[in-house]
Image (cartoon, rainbow, N blue to C red):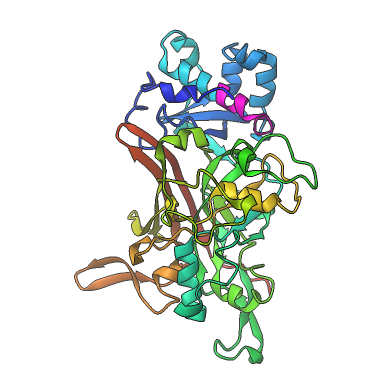
Amino acid sequence: HKRNMASLFTSSWVEGADAHIHFTIHNLPFGIFSTEDKGPRVGVAIGDFILDLSQVSKADLFNGVNELDSEFWSGLFESPTLNLFMERERCDWRAIRAKVGELLSSVDNQAAVSACLVPAPTAKMHLPATIGDYTDFYSSREHATNVGTMFRGADNALQPNWLHLPVGYHGRSSSVVVSGTDLHRPNGQLQADNNDPSKGSTYGPCRLMDFELEMAFFVGGKATALGEPVAMENAEDKIFGMVLMNDWSARDIQKWEYVPLGPFGSKNFGTSISPWVVSLDALKPFQCQTSAGQQEPTPLPYLVDPTYSSYNIDLKVSIQPEGSEEVHQVGNSNFKHLYWTIKQQLVHHTVTGCNVKAGDLMGSGTISGTNETAYGSMLELSWRGSKEVILKEENDEKLIRKFLQDGDNVVMEAACSNGDVRVGFGQCTGRVLPAKKLF
């Protein structure tokens, strides 16, 4: 594989890019966008602009990259999804990202490249890929401990298997939506008596609507064959990049349905992801220890990650009430609070021989820190509804939440900063619409 050439570029001639919080020359994430005059195609975010890679290809500026011609790259970048590009090997992802970095930092082709820039506010963002399969993990020890304590007590917070494998479940790719998509409060079965499950259930709208502050990665590279596991030493080459994710949850529906097979309708009504996919190369400067430091007990040999580590990604979640311009932060966590790494998640997912392909999405699970301000869900922030979460307090009046209300816009943000090097994911947003009346 070619080295991460894009990391050599320190400045861009694109106006405002060097001062941008998320999309600097150090980032160069891939996404799918459209404009009024043209349908979805591949772009790279740089400052408040999008570099149209389909136009860059047509201008012959990718000709010869990895010994492939302009026509080849045009076929990939005129596609309405990233899947074709994701299916290439990591050396191709790196080569294109490095070439983009060169074009956006060198003035040699500035006029030609400038013609390929689209102001981001004029563009509409789309799902980055056609998502074949979606899996969600449960890999934050702090979150798992909090939830386990609520329902089973502190002495039995973690299930016996939790420290031995990355727990996960298969979700619905059909209801994964791009940031900015509004979602209706789900209807479903609710336990009739919270204290006595023998009294059965009722039907109605979810009353305990929640967000989950997560991140996710897209699988890349050639599809694996059925029966072919991904080994730890190859795992990073099979990860195309990462996005921010809100795995919406209906807690009361979940309570009634989850025994014995886990979440079902309480999770399948919607999952939101941010539109820009950030590469692991862009995140390399932010590599850090996990909050655990090391794993105890030592995982089984196939799960041992010799470079066991995480990324120092600051995560924020806020609520914007309906009709308000104010956005109120309720939580601030960090990606390093994942006990099981993304490589371990992928390796365990495939150890059975489960085949994966480019565009498959894998969620981290809710990412919570150790203190109350670092919790990644309203379930934890309100401690199962027993506490008020204060959004605003003014003149002895409080604006509070325990769970989400109709009209609430949930705003998540993820960003890294290390001196002059800044890499971000932008925002992942979604508004709660009223439940539909079906019966």
Pick out the residue farthest to the right: 226
Q: Is residue 121 magenta?
A: no
Viewport quadrant of the N terminus: top right
Write down the quadrant of residue 439 in the picture: bottom right
Q: Where residue 386 sits: x, y (%)?
A: 40, 79
Q: Is residue 414 above or below residue 379?
A: above
Residue 426: % across, % down: 44, 42
Of residues 419 and 254, which is closer to you in this image? 419
Magenta stretch contains residue 91: yes
Residue 166 in view of the camera: yes
Q: Residue at x 60, y 15 (%)?
A: 65
Secondary structure mostly taken by the magenta-highlighted segment of the chain: helix
Residue 281 position (above or below residue 254)? above
**Left or right, 337 with reference to 99:** left
Residue 210: percent from left, percent from top: 50, 66
Whether 66 is drawn above or below 7: the answer is: above
Q: Quadrant of the rendered structure where residue 26 is?
A: top left
Q: Is residue 274 visible?
A: no
Q: How many marks?
A: 0
Which residue is at 62% across, 24% downward? 92
- Spot the residue most to the left: 395
- Please state which of residues 240 and 25 is positioned toward the viewer in this rendering: 240
Q: Which residues are magenta?
A: 85-95
Residue 96: percent from left, percent from top: 57, 22
For residue 421, which quarter of the picture? Answer: top left
Q: In this image, 395 relative to 273: left or right?
A: left
